[in-house]
Amino acid sequence: MRRGEKPVHIVVTEPVRVESLDLDAQGIARLTPNEDELAQGQGGKVIFIQGALPTELVTYVVTRDKARFSKAKVLDILKPAVFRAHPQCKAFGICGGCTMQHLDVRAQVAMKQRVLEDDLKHIAKVVPEEILRPMGGPAWEYRHRARLSAVNRSIKKGTVLIGFHEGKSAYVADMTACEILPKHVSNLLPELRQLVMGLSIVDRMPQIEVAVGEPEDPNSDDPRKTKPVTALVFRNLLPLTLTDEQLLRDFSDAHQVWIWLQPKGIETVAPFYPLTGKLCYRLPEFEVEMPFKPADFTQVNHMMNRTLVSRAIRLLDVQAGDRVLDLFCGIGNFTLPLARRARTVLGIEGLESLTTRAKENALHNQLVETVSFMQSNLFEVTPETIASWEKAERWLMDPPREGAMEICQSLAKLHQQGSELPPKRIVYVSCNPKTLARDADILCHQAGYGLASAGIINMFPHTSHVESIAVFDLASS
């Protein structure tokens, strides 16, 4: 709700049938048009109903009323949808993190696939030659990275609240468990409340970052080395007292977690106790182990990341003699596995810190002979920039939400110049179907590519996040 807008509470007992669902998991219904709307050739007013699903007959409470649409919450479900599911999390409807828990996972996947196909059709005006089978995995306890907010609500609640924000709100949800976090992390939420409450800087500890890595040594006889490694990064806006430091050490020992601190910007993140440790994930198919720091960007769903890397490299169809470019390479998530298949691989990343980590990971995996990394701003790319990268037969791109428009536009210019620099095949991994579709429009209508295949990866079950993958082949001249 916008600032200054007064809330409303209008109970509507006249049932409506829900027609569709938006990406915020709101049911969409349309009222019968009145005489004025009919006279103007308009449809009836649109109602966005939180908690309602397509095909359902519901009553609702209006919480925001505009001339052309209303926002509402479901009051009663008179006829439930066959794909309605029982939310597993007690904070569902309060926490803003998993808005689709009331929708069967199979229906979630189908909806995300439809979003991708619709965006490609309407934005890019293309249809893939092949729709890839959706990739899915565990629906619960999958999230190995999280940013928890901490707020001192001792006057109102008698405790500190630690968790995710409420839906479209600055308030932190009152939650003591989270079903998408690994069980051992979820169990820590009440313990973290008590820990932060005991600190002298209780009002100056706004955030706790969670990063879970794979066991240090799954084959060890030491049970401590066969458990997942869990790092907690405490954002301390004021220095800790000696008592604070001891409380953190005691918490680390009691729960076998690795404590890091962040007193200022992201560059200040450093281990506090113990001073050393090992945080990593593994890609067994490629014999790659990826050490990372809690502040590094990595995929939050380790199991689905394995599946994604495997499919992306298989789709790229790398040959032993190929030179490959990995754009937006991060710490080397695709680059190092590609180095097991290709002649040489160049990973390009915009952030110096991630480029440094990627080089370290190449050394860790003894791949420095076949892989190299460079830092470059991939949002300021020209045909001359691509020429400086030199010819590569295949590219993999995994851009952030903004997409890779400048790269695609430069490929279009090279194509129009008759250049031989554009790769034969591009595999494009996307976290935003709209920017993927925008870039597909450029590649398919200006750069000489055809869309061979596309599909989704359900990387974030119960959320509206759509992760997708597309394959572009350069048309034969």
Image (spheres, rainbow, N blue to C red):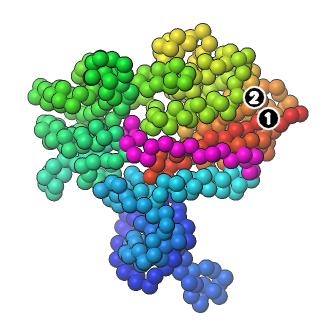
Q: Which residues are magenta?
A: 126-146
Indicate whether 414 appears above or below 454: above
Residue at 31 percent across and 30 percent down: it is 230
Q: Secondary structure at mark 1?
A: strand
The disc placed on residue 126 is none
Q: Secondary structure at mark 2?
A: loop
**Mark 2 lies on residue:** 423
Task: Locate residue 286 relative to residue 279 in the image: left or right.
Answer: right
Q: Determine which quarter of the picture holds residue 246.
A: top left
**Mark 1 lies on residue:** 474
Q: Determine which quarter of the picture holds residue 467.
A: top right
> Overall secondary structure of the magenta stretch?
loop
State yes or no: discs 1 and 2 in contact (Cβ < 8 Å): yes
Indicate whether 101 appears above or below 467: below
Q: Residues within 10 Å of mark 1 (few under 14, many from 20)?
A: some
Image location (x, y in percent) of residue 26: 47, 64
Image location (x, y in percent) of residue 59: 42, 78
